[in-house]
């Protein structure tokens, strides 16, 4: 954080900015783990592990999935891996610079009396903890969005503004916009909404003044954004698009709010939700109701405060601008048949954190007897959600590491193994596979197999299956297993191990 931008200019304020950075590093140190990569992270690892830039681009272009539409993140994590390696921890540690920078910008933009509240909600955010521990672009989006929000909020406060401070925050704004747009094509939608909010927050006159005073910064940024725009047009022309696994319905709408508001750790694991639906939440009702009460309290207080401090026209306009990407994403998910999830709304987290920070500050200042217990309750339940996401067995990621190790052991023992899971995870954990055919020393890789494929193969001793809705969506392998020739030997997170019965030849 630029020391010139400390609001009072005191040495104490300058030191606090360093403390916010230390806070961000502490969060990252706890949130990031070396758990097994799951399939989406294995896609990242495949690109990051390429020895040369040419190899990286060849894999990017050959993939034709959503990774091709994440150019800045993918090239960044490739470069990061060249310095720090491509272990599970190192790939996720690439998130650290983005989160710390965003956290400092977000907290530093608040007035002194609200910075502690801003620090609490940002550092104890379960959504942020979860995606810090994932080698995907969402922590980059969190950091970029925090930078954008911090810059807009700080520039809207004109008091004691200096030329160098204003320039610093303009740079932070455009760094966030470019990073958000480059992190994924979906980021462009959210960045566009942020830009549309500027005249509502500043007024057209101040927007024009800022553009004139920092014309070179604006022109360079616009040029980079045009390059990104041209790149995304090209990806659409060559047919790159996200996976069509799943569908969008009203349950997805609820899950987005569930994740963003921080309920994730308090509730069931994602794999259980995937199989059990709404019924999976019932055993966790008590914790979720308690958290709902404290979160609702903060949201109501924040709404009351903003309603009385922000001009009605501005508030309505900002709500409309924020709602535009939400409507677009859900509409696209429904129309284009892909599942919209909480992570696709990552930039919206900044709005959630801002509202919670305003509410937390207002609650703490109130003299009502319940105010302090409500604040403590929010803090305690938020931290519980964070640590449960990080440590609880039910929240473990798909355990490709353990499944691949088991498969390799079986192969080394001369057994025939079928691998009904992602090939990228197998590649990262060095499990040799053969695509739908038998090869000595390799597992047979099967994805949504047809009955005739299974009939043409030798009966295996071991079948390792994962997420049947993705890898066996026709139920063919499930039917093969259910014929009574196999029993469940064990399981890892998102994996089931089936062994052939000894009396079956």
Image (tube, rainbow, N blue to C red):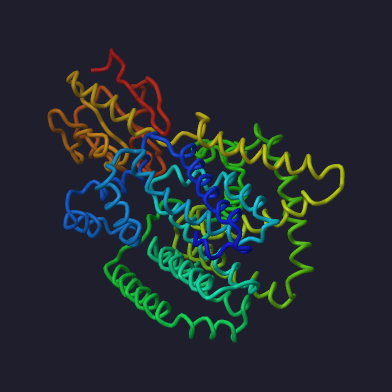
Q: Residue furthest front?
A: 11
Q: Nearer the viewer, residue 94 or 231?
A: 94
Q: Residue at x 61, y 41 (%)?
A: 278
Vertical side of 303 occupied by 364: above or below: above
Q: Nearer the viewer, residue 134 or 26?
A: 26
For residue 60, above or below residue 499: below
Q: Quadrant of the C terminus?
A: top left
Judged left or right of residue 435, residue 140 is: right
How many dots with numbers? 0
Pinpoint residue 304: horizontal percent, then vertical percent.
78, 62
Q: Residue at x 17, y 31 (%)?
A: 442
**Where in the figure is residue 396, as x and y percent of width and height?**
46, 33
Give left or right: position of 85 versus 332: left
* 290 vs 421, nearest the viewer: 290
Q: Is residue 454 above or below residue 211?
A: above
Q: Please, which residue is most extreme toward the top here?
A: 503
**What residue appears at the point 17 percent right and 53 percent down from the top-left corner?**
52
Image-quadrant location for residue 71: bottom left
Q: Is residue 117 visible?
A: yes
Determine the residue located farthest toward the left in the rendered image.
Answer: 440
């Amino acid at each position: 954080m630029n020391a010139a931008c400390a609001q009072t200019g005191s040495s104490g304020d300058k030191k606090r900015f360093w403390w916010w950075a230390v806070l961000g590093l502490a969060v990252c140190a706890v949130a990031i783990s070396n758990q097994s990569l799951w399939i989406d992270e294995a896609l990242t690892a495949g690109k990051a592990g390429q020895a040369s830039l040419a190899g990286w681009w060849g894999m990017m272009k050959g993939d034709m999935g959503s990774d091709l539409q994440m150019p800045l993140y993918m090239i960044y994590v490739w470069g990061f891996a060249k310095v720090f390696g491509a272990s599970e921890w190192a790939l996720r540690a690439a998130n650290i610079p983005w989160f710390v920078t965003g956290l400092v910008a977000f907290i530093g933009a608040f007035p002194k009396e609200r910075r502690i509240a801003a620090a609490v909600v940002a550092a104890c955010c379960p959504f942020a903890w979860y995606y810090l521990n994932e080698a995907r672009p969402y922590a980059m989006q969190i950091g970029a969005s925090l930078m954008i929000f911090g810059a807009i909020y700080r520039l809207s406060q004109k008091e004691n503004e200096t030329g160098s401070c204003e320039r610093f925050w303009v740079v932070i704004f455009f760094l966030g916009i470019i990073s958000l747009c480059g992190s994924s094509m979906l980021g462009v939608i959210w960045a566009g909404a942020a830009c549309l909010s500027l005249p509502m927050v500043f007024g057209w006159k101040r927007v024009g003044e800022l553009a004139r005073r920092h014309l070179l910064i604006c022109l360079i940024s616009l040029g980079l954004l045009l390059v990104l725009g041209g790149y995304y047009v090209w990806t659409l022309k060559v047919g790159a698009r996200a996976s069509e696994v799943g569908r969008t319905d009203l349950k997805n709408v609820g899950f987005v709010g569930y994740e963003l508001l921080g309920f994730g750790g308090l509730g069931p694991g994602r794999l259980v939700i995937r199989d059990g639906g709404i019924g999976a939440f019932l055993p966790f009702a008590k914790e979720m109701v308690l958290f709902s009460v404290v979160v609702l309290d903060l949201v109501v207080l924040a709404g009351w405060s903003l309603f009385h401090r922000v001009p009605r026209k501005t508030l309505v306009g900002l709500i409309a601008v924020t709602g535009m990407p939400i409507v677009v994403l859900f509409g696209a998910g429904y129309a284009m048949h892909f599942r919209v999830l909480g992570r696709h709304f990552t930039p919206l987290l900044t709005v959630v954190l801002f509202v919670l920070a305003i509410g937390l500050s207002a609650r703490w200042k109130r003299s009502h007897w319940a105010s302090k217990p409500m604040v403590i309750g929010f803090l305690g339940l938020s931290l519980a959600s964070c640590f449960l996401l990080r440590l609880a067995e039910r929240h473990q990621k798909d355990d490709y590491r353990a499944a691949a190790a088991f498969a390799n052991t079986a192969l080394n023992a001369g057994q025939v193994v079928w691998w009904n899971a992602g090939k990228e995870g197998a590649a990262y954990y060095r499990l040799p596979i053969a695509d739908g055919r038998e090869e000595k020393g390799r597992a047979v890789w099967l994805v949504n197999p047809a009955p005739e494929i299974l009939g043409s193969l030798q009966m295996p001793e071991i079948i390792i299956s994962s997420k049947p809705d993705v890898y066996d969506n026709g139920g063919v392998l499930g039917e093969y297993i259910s014929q009574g020739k196999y029993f469940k030997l064990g399981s890892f997170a998102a994996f089931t191990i089936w062994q052939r019965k000894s009396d079956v030849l």
